[in-house]
Image (cartoon, helix red, strand yellow):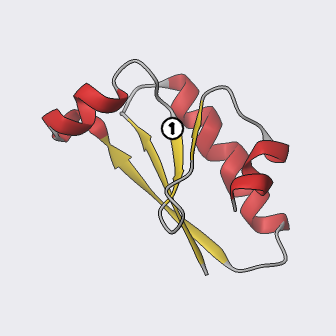
């Protein structure tokens, strides 16, 4: 099972859009995957790393990351 992390923050409309696209991709995927959202505002290290890049999707197994903008095709490649 692929473990994905979506870095973002509350009130971010791009993060909400990325989450909706990710939900869609995971429902359509034939392989089991799951994701968790992480609010970077709760961690200064994450805020420094991702503050200007969010939303960021990370494959926690491989370490590969996608910076916004991304769509279903890019998400499938990182899974």
Give the quadrant of residue 69: top right
Give the quadrant of residue 77: bottom right
Judging from the image, what secondary structure is the residue with disc 1 in? strand
Which residue is at a point 77% across and 67% down the rendered structure image?
27
Which residue is at a point 70% across and 80% down the rendered structure image?
32
- Mark 1: give few (<14), some (14-19) or many (20+) Cα within 10 Å: many
Which residue is at a point 54% across and 63% down the rendered structure image?
62
Given residues 79 and 19, the one toward you in this image is 79
Location of residue 20 with respect to 27 vertically, above or below: above
How many numbered tags mark residues here? 1
Q: Which quarter of the rendered picture does the C terminus lie within?
A: bottom right
Location of residue 60 with respect to 56 vertically, above or below: below
Given residues 63 and 58, the one toward you in this image is 63
Look at mark 1 in the image and give the residue it sits on.
56
Residue 30: % across, % down = 84, 77
Location of residue 36 with respect to 73 vertically, above or below: below
Residue 56: % across, % down = 51, 37
Left or right, 29 with respect to 2, comes to right
Residue 13: % across, % down = 54, 24
Location of residue 20 with respect to 67 vertically, above or below: below
Residue 59: % across, % down = 55, 59
Q: Which quarter of the rendered picture does the N terminus lie within?
A: bottom right
């Amino acid at each position: 099972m692929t473990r994905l992390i979506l870095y973002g923050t509350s009130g971010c409309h791009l993060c909400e859009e990325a989450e909706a696209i990710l939900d869609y991709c995971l429902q359509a995927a034939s392989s089991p995957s799951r994701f968790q959202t992480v609010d970077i505002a709760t961690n200064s290290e994450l805020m420094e790393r991702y503050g200007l890049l969010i939303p960021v999707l990370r494959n926690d197994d491989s370490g590969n990351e996608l910076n916004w903008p991304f769509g279903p095709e890019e998400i499938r490649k990182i899974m």
